[in-house]
Amino acid sequence: MEKWMVMRKGAPFQEIAEKFHIHPVIARIIRNREIIGDDNIQTYLHGTITDLHDGMLMKDMDKAVDILLEKINEGKKIRIIGDYDIDGINATYILLEGLRRLGGEVDIDIPDRMKDGYGLNQTLIDNAFQAGVDTIITCDNGIAACEEIGYGKRLGMTIVVTDHHEVPYEENEEEKRYILPPADAVVDPKQQDCAYPFKELCGAAVAYKVIEALFEVSGKDIEDVDYLMENVAIATVGDVMDLVGENRIFVKQGLDMLKRTNNPGLKALIECTRVNVEQLSAYHIGFVIGPCLNASGRLDTAKRAIELLCAKNKREADILAGDLKALNDSRKDLTMQAVEEAITSIEETDLKNDRVLVVFLPNCHESLAGIVAGRIRERYYKPTFVITRAEEGLKGSGRSIEAYHMYEELNKCKHLLSKFGGHKLAAGISLEEKELAAFRILLNENAGLSEEDMIPKIAIDMQLPFSYIDETLVEQLELLEPFGKGNQKPVFVEKDLEVLHTRVMGKNQNVLKMQVRDVNGKIMDAVYFGNVAEFLAYFEQKRDAKAAFTYYPSVNEYQGRKSLQIVIQNYR
């Protein structure tokens, strides 16, 4: 059972509504998102490209620009080294496209997930050196590659780091000592002494800022590279960055550009995944387009996704998009099998009694461990690690719940791990098989999770009677988009409802249409997407009981007719 919590944050809602010409309900939701003050509200509702900060405010941006322009002018070989996930892929493409347009002699390399693991390594640097590369520029990695960059410098190479990850540090009783790599320039807004006002950019956004600064200093029109914002939008959503501040502007603008993109590869991917381009949203990036790009780095090589983005004509793009969709379909099947195997191993053993789940799936493809851990975490609402066999020892990925700081808990077990990294809600680990049982025991001994901690929380914006719902409100809710992490879709609640006239629909019988009546007798069309059999069984047991639903209002269009409906999310 979830715990429902209605937010009760105060503000002069009527005054805000009048000042910004919005519905008081919208004013209340904005306050719930901690958007406070006229300037912040204005930017949140109507922010544009002109509200983005100047990339030259980033520490070392001037150095990076000088180095890269000099190398371009001298015709030196430049190699971009990115990463195999959606952020790294788009960051690599942005740098490649921008540097080529400035006349740079540039190519790319991306580590292989299985063979190389994450980020820069000595082999990638050796390969670049042997190919006569003069300058390496990293994207979405590099900030933690001190040894590797030191090695590249000893070979006489120029190295520019562009990244968005936390700067590694050593901690003593008095302070943290931050450890920067010995690169010629390090562009990462997370550096302590970086003056850039917005710290939460993804790797692709940092890469975009570099290209923008290069164009500006070269005297070229920066509007010529505006189209790369569509790649920033894909990376921002795909890398699950908070959709606040600049990220919100990038995604809003990028989605608009994506609807009329000239990139043959993205066009082909949108077509072959059957996304309605007019209704393209952050949801489609997160759950349809993004996973296809990510699948290349999971089951093959991320270079396939770069090839798609660089495709020059429709025929080439269609073939590559079809390949990526097929790879993602295969990834989905493998994921489903692994999830079922994980559920069986939990339900049929004493694992189900653990507060922290450590599930060993020896034959699961290691690139899927994180996705499987996420699905198991959702099902049981417990911190979950999925461990698989790798070329050397075991590898695993973890996904956490709000009350459990995964990285700090791993720190308490680090003597059992050969390698680990991550943050509060996700982590990656390597360990020897002989340590697996001890790892599970120690995690659970240290867990300290209460029953309360393991109840999912549903944050509700407000109780909204049906009489408030009209087309104007539904239209104004669109002002709050794009939705995602850090800017969740609003959740409304109404109670004392009667369920009337249920009808099961959909090819897989997973859509439930119904009508619901409130205490004032107002009847509203409603739809529920989820476990329909469970929903019907629940209300069969409580036949005469009144229901409470969390919901989101929408307009249903069918055969040219529009009608208001609510989309039910949770029920009790």
Image (cartoon, rainbow, N blue to C red):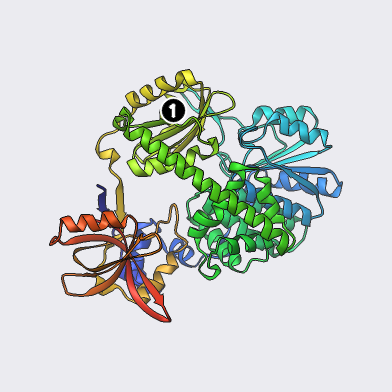
Q: Position of residue 554 (x, y in %)?
A: 37, 70
The vertical placement of 347 against 446, above or below, is: below
User: In the shown orientation, is residue 130 left or right of residue 430?
Assistant: right
Q: Amino acid at mark 1?
A: Leu
Q: Position of residue 34 (x, y in %)?
A: 38, 55
Count residues near mark 1 (Cα–Cα under 10 Å), then give few for <14, some for 14-19, many for 20+.
many
Q: Position of residue 171 (x, y in %)?
A: 50, 25
Q: Which residue: 86% across, 47% down?
A: 75
Q: Which residue: 74% across, 33% down?
A: 125
Q: Nearer the viewer, residue 569 or 359?
A: 359
- On the image, numbered disc 1 is attached to which residue? 410
Instruction: Assign a secondary structure to mark 1.
Output: helix
> Can residue 556 be seen in this snapshot?
yes
> Can residue 53 be seen in this snapshot?
no
Count of numbered marks = 1
Name, please, the residue furthest toward the bottom: 560
The vertical placement of 290 against 362, above or below, is: below
The vertical placement of 150 against 485, above or below, is: above
Q: Which residue: 14% across, 60% down?
A: 545
Which quarter of the rendered picture does the C terminus lie within?
A: bottom left
Q: Which residue: 68% across, 50% down?
A: 306
User: In the shown orientation, is residue 238 left or right of residue 344?
Assistant: right
